[in-house]
């Protein structure tokens, strides 16, 4: 009996201890609030958050809007001639028909209008925009948000980067604050400001659209003949429409993080995919543009391609990072440094090379004349090669020239047999005028685009080479013979 009593007493004490422990635990938990009850956000708190965000957008509009301008351009083009008539038979039937009965169709001039936006970056009237906004413009008008209009003058252009600075004769203007695009993150607020339809609604004040940063380091294909480098772009779903080009993309603090440059669309309108040039890219060339200096891009003189699975397996690489050299151009920094076709470039100045766009960006923004180190793989061996970065040539020097420089207000190119046949000429000797500048000696002489020059001062012109040699030495008035007859071409407009 004694044993059973002790056993019952022990069990009782154990149960009492468990009860006391549970009670103490509940007291301690409640006392220190280790598991606070979940509370729903009140309507008042939601309204306060919304009001704070709304006020931020309003503040951005008030602070940045006055520094955003509307840019309208005017370009005179000449059209007309028999190229207006199209033959369904694939030959020159209609062309010859109209020539026989009506003669040459007169060429006419018309004015093409363009619109865009810009952002003031200096109080004395310097405005940053896209190069394509003012390209070929013969007249530029800048309208400020307060309605004042000024004539715009192009100070500097960066065709490859699609950036330009224009100047207006105004002072003490509001200036937008330039931010740091390297700090931009996906998901952050993005605000596009511009004046896409100001010309239609007759209102100079810019519009504001809001979205988020959708992606970073986007690249657009280089389909343009201008060989623009659209890489490292910021992607946003803030509405960007035609006419927004050149305007700023800003963050919620009102700092410019990009220059709106393009939209992806199948309809010509907004589809939620817009792109902006990072402002740090613009800042790298901004001072040169303001001072009217040439923007020089670094160049190695190689053609490169990305590394795919097959190339990776063939060379026994562990990953697809880097690029393979497909061609080394003659007499270039790459050739002088000893780079060879088949070399795989893995690093540039100690930094990994991801792909072709990455290397192009690294080289492009390297100062001309700087010696850089390339980490390459050749015959499965790792090597370091030093290259002195050269200056990227203008596009026209990268390939065989097809046109001659402007001479007395006209641009010509070689006359092809196809073009000669189209114009009813028996021979394809000569050069054809492809552009006539307004108020130039060529225009005053009555020359037109499409005219074929066959001789100058009775010296036959067979091709572009003959034309360039001859025109480089001509002084004073000269006698041109075209397929329409002789004309006297003066040295300058009187």
Image (cartoon, rainbow, N blue to C red):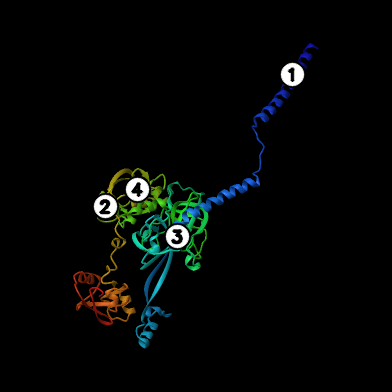
Q: Closer to the observer: label 3 or label 2?
A: 3
Q: Earlier in the sequence, mark 1 or mark 4?
A: 1
Corner quadrant of residue 440: bottom left
Residue 342 rendering spot, x and y as whole percentages = 33, 51
Q: How far is the residue under mark 3 from the one under mark 1?
A: 80 Å
- Residue 69 can be seen in this image: yes
Q: Closer to the observer: label 3 or label 1?
A: 3
The residue under the point 66% across, 39% down is: 38
Q: How far is the residue under mark 4 from the one under mark 2?
A: 15 Å
Report whether 62 appears left or right of 358. right
The numbered dot on residue 262 is 3
As rendered, which of 265 and 348 lies closer to the eye? 265
Q: Earlier in the sequence, mark 3 or mark 2?
A: 3
Q: Which residue is mark 1?
A: 13
Residue 269 rendering spot, x and y as whole percentages = 51, 64
Element under label 1? Answer: helix
Q: Around disc 1, counting alpha carbons within 10 Å, would you say few (fewer than 14), some (14 to 19), or many (20 or more)?
A: few
Looking at the rendered structure, the number of numbered marks drawn on it comes to 4
Report whether 213 appears left or right of 150. right
Q: Which residue is mark 2?
A: 335
Element under label 2? Answer: helix
Q: Quadrant of the C terminus?
A: bottom left
As rendered, which of 398 and 309 lies closer to the eye? 398
Q: How far is the residue under mark 4 from the one under mark 3?
A: 31 Å
Q: Around disc 3, counting alpha carbons within 10 Å, would you say few (fewer than 14), some (14 to 19), or many (20 or more)?
A: many
Q: Which residue is mark 4?
A: 345
Element under label 3? Answer: strand
**Proximity of marks 2 and 1: CB atoms separated by less than 8 Å:** no
Q: Earlier in the sequence, mark 4 or mark 3?
A: 3
């Amino acid at each position: 009996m004694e044993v059973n009593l002790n056993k019952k007493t022990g069990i009782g004490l154990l149960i009492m201890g468990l009860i006391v422990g549970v009670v103490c635990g509940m007291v301690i938990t409640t006392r220190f609030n280790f598991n606070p009850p979940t509370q729903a956000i009140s309507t008042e708190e939601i309204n306060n958050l919304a009001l704070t965000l709304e006020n931020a957008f309003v503040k951005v509009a008030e602070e940045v809007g006055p520094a955003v301008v509307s840019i309208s351009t005017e370009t005179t083009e000449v059209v007309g001639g028999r190229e207006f008539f199209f033959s369904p038979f694939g030959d020159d039937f209609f062309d010859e028909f109209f020539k026989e009965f009506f003669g040459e169709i007169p060429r006419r001039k018309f004015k093409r209008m363009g619109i865009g936006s810009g952002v003031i970056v200096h109080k004395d009237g310097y405005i940053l925009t896209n190069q394509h906004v003012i390209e070929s413009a013969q007249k530029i008008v800048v309208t400020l948000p307060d309605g004042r209009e000024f004539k715009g003058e192009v100070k500097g252009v960066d065709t490859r980067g699609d950036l330009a600075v224009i100047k207006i004769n105004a002072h003490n203007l509001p200036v937008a604050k330039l931010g740091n695009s390297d700090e931009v993150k996906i998901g952050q607020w993005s605000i596009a400001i511009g004046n896409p339809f100001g010309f239609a609604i007759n209102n100079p004040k810019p519009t504001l659209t809001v979205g988020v940063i959708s992606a970073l380091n986007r690249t657009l294909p280089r389909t343009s003949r201008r060989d623009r480098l659209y890489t490292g772009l910021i992607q946003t779903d803030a509405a960007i429409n035609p006419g927004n080009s050149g305007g700023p993309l800003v963050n919620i603090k009102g700092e410019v993080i990009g220059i709106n440059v393009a939209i992806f669309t199948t309809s010509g309108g907004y589809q939620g995919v817009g792109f902006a040039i990072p402002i740090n890219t613009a800042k790298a060339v901004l001072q040169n543009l303001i001072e009217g200096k040439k923007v020089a891009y670094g160049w190695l003189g190689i053609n490169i391609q990305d590394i795919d699975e097959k190339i990776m397996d063939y060379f026994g690489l562990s990953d697809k990072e880097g690029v393979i050299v497909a061609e080394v151009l003659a007499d270039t920094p790459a050739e002088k440094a000893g780079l060879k076709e088949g070399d795989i470039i893995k690093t540039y100045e100690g930094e990994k090379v991801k792909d072709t766009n990455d290397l192009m960006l690294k080289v492009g923004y390297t100062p001309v004349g700087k010696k850089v180190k390339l980490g390459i793989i050749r015959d499965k061996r790792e090597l370091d090669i030093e290259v002195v970065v050269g200056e990227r040539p203008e596009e026209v020097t990268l390939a065989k020239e097809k046109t001659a420089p402007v001479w007395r207000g006209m641009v010509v190119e070689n006359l092809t047999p196809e073009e000669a046949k189209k114009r009813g000429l028996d021979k394809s000797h000569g050069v054809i005028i492809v552009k006539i500048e307004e108020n130039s000696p060529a225009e005053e002489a009555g020359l037109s685009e499409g005219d074929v020059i066959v001789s100058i001062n009775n010296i036959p012109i067979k091709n572009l080479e003959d034309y360039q040699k001859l025109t480089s030495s001509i002084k004073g008035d000269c006698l041109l013979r075209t397929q329409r007859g002789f004309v006297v071409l003066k040295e300058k407009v009187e």
